[in-house]
Image (cartoon, grey):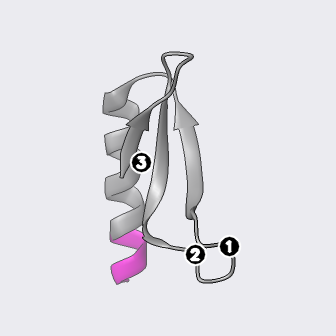
Amino acid sequence: MIRKLKSGKYRLYSRKKDAKTGRRKNLGTFGTRAAAEKHERAVQFFKRH
């Protein structure tokens, strides 16, 4: 899940909420949406391997 921050950057959050905190994990902050989407694909690839 990618969300735009007030600063204009994009943050990648986990799809599921963290059971401990009840919030989504921060998986990185990126300058462009394309960079965030690229990293999201890399995360999904890693999870399936």
Q: Amino acid at mark 3?
A: His
- Quickly name the residue at label 1: 21
Residue numbers of the magenta segment: 45-49
Q: Amino acid at mark 1?
A: Thr
Disc 3 and disc 2: Cα gap in Å?
20 Å
Q: Which SS class for mark 2?
A: loop
- Quickly name the residue at label 3: 39
User: As drawn, which residue projects farthest toward the right?
Assistant: 20
* Closer to viewer: mark 1 or mark 3: 1
Between discs 1 and 3, the one toward the N terminus: 1
Mark 1 crowdedness (10 Å alpha carbons): few <14, some 14-19, many ≥20: few
- 13 or 19, nearer to the observer: 19
- Kindly indicate the quadrant of the structure image that contains residue 47: bottom left
Q: Which SS class for mark 3?
A: helix
Vertical placement of 12 versus 16: above or below?
Answer: above
Q: Position of residue 7 (x, y in %)?
A: 57, 16
Residue 21 relative to residue 12: left or right: right
Vertical placement of 4 versus 2: above or below?
Answer: above
